[in-house]
Image (cartoon, rainbow, N blue to C red):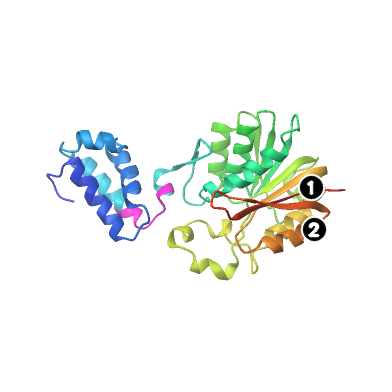
Amino acid sequence: MSRGFTLREAYEQGRTTLSLAGLESPAFDALCLFEMAFGIGDRASLAIHGGEPAEEGRLEQFNRLIIRRTREPLQYILGRWEFDGMELSVGEGVLVPREDTMALVETACSRLADNPSPHVLDLCAGSGAVGLAIAKNMPSASVVCVEKSTAALPYLRQNIEEYGQGRVKCVEGDVLQAPSGCGIHGSFDCVVSNPPYIPSGDIEGLAWEVRCEPRMALDGGKDGLVFYRAICDLWMPLVRNNGLVAFEIGYDIRDGVMEIMSKHNIHHIQAAKDFGGIDRCIFGTVVS
């Protein structure tokens, strides 16, 4: 970008650059980055002020952001991303919250609706999106979020501080090991998890933006089921009789997850669909 650009010209050139780079939503992405650089984040304001000159320093900043966007996820550049009305802190090293995950949140909240004060365990918590959304929608719930990644933990802690309302706790721990290893004891009314579930051999075939996210949060082992097995093997003893277990799943592992759950005294196993009509959540009841 050169000197003498108007705000409108700056935005349009940024949008064109992203479009030529093959991004799915170049106009939206460019507008988000335009707001970071110029403080204008809606089309109405851009229409009103578009003829004004673009200040050189801000123009250079916008150009740098546009170039970054051709190499990095938008969410990491912005540093925050909306999930269920919360502006969660995100960045390199943590999985980006996705709208599809609301199927897991809504299932948990619906099934726990009659519990006056549910105690919830969120495994592979990442940014804390699931546990925090449950706490937000269920003011009497208490939530323990377990996460292993030292890169993700700072985001989880920051989000809990901002949105946890004193009812959400962060625990550093490995879900592939016994709960006692991270000091978790007692019992829970519900275990939820959005674990890594992409088969290892499929990782390299994912879109480049997804591959920018931590492999640790994506890789579910050879068949994508490693974490489901571990959670059912190691963590089910913490779930009270008639308690709820709910998982997010990938589109092609539904039957495998259901089979694992059925072998661990989990009954009434059902699927819930995401906004796109795809089975996204598998849930059932623990019968001791």
Image location (x, y in percent) of residue 242: 82, 43
User: Tag 1 or tag 2, which sits nearer the N-term?
Assistant: 2
Circle number at residue 262 = 2
Image location (x, y in percent) of residue 60: 23, 46
Region of the chain picked out in magenta, as a range = 67-75
Depth check, front residue: 69 or 169: 69
- Secondary structure beneath disc 2? helix
C-alpha gap between disc 2 and disc 1: 10 Å
Query: Left or right of 20: which side holds 167?
Result: right
Q: Label 1 neighbourhood size at 10 Å, few (<14), some (14-19), many (20+)?
A: many
* Residue at the spot 34% in from the left edge and 53% down from the top edge: 68
Depth check, front residue: 121 or 263: 263
- Secondary structure beneath disc 1? strand
Q: Which amino acid does label 2 sit on?
A: Ser
On screen, 200 above or below 47? Answer: below
**68 drawn magenta:** yes
On screen, 223 above or below 75? Answer: below
Q: What residue type is labelled 1?
A: Thr
Circle number at residue 285 = 1
* Residue at the spot 50% in from the left edge and 49% down from the top edge: 96
* Residue at the spot 58% in from the left edge and 36% down from the top edge: 160
